[in-house]
């Protein structure tokens, strides 16, 4: 019985380590991003619809999402009424 218990303990420990390691890796990968994202990594300015490079323009965190703006004017417009630009497909033009 002792052998079984120690095996069980080892199995649980191993499972926890695997889970913790995997979760930590996923979180790290998510936040770290890719070293060189490539061409498809541009953000779209939600105000004017322009593509904004990650190292250009202005960035703002809103509702756990990073929005990028091509200019100060767009950032100001977003801050004045963020819900107007963040609610996707709020009004379908049809
Ligand atoms: Zn803009």
Image (cartoon, rainbow, N blue to C red):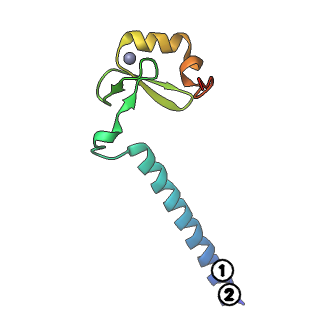
Q: Quadrant of the N terminus?
A: bottom right
Residue under pointer 2: 4
Give the quadrant of residue 63.
top right
- Residue at 45% across, 56% down: 25
Q: Secondary structure at mark 2?
A: helix
Asked if the residue at label 2 sits under 8 Å from ligand 1, the reply is no
Q: Residues at badges 1 and 2 in contact (C-beta under 8 Å)? A: yes
Residue 77's x, y, as percent? 48, 10
Q: Is residue 72 above or below residue 52?
A: above
Ligand 1 resides in the quarter of the picture at: top left
CA–CA distance in space, label 1 to label 2: 6 Å
Viewer-closest of 60 and 90: 90
Residue 36 spot, x, y in % from top left: 27, 44
Residue 52 is labelled as none
| Residue 32, x across and y down, in percent | 38, 45
Badge 1 is on which residue? Answer: 8
Residue in view at x 63 percent, y 25 percent: 90
Is residue 28 positioned above or below 69 on the image?
Answer: below
* Along the viewing direction, whichever of 75 and 30 lies nearer the viewer: 75
């Amino acid at each position: 019985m002792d052998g079984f218990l120690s095996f069980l303990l080892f199995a649980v420990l191993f499972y926890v380590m695997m889970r913790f390691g995997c979760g930590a890796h996923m979180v790290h990968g998510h936040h770290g991003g890719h070293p060189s994202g490539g061409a498809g990594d541009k953000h779209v300015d939600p105000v004017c619809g322009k593509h904004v490079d990650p190292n250009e323009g202005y960035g703002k965190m809103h509702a756990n999402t990073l929005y990028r703006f091509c200019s100060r004017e767009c950032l100001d417009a977003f801050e004045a009424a963020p819900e107007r630009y963040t609610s996707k497909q709020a009004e379908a033009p049809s």
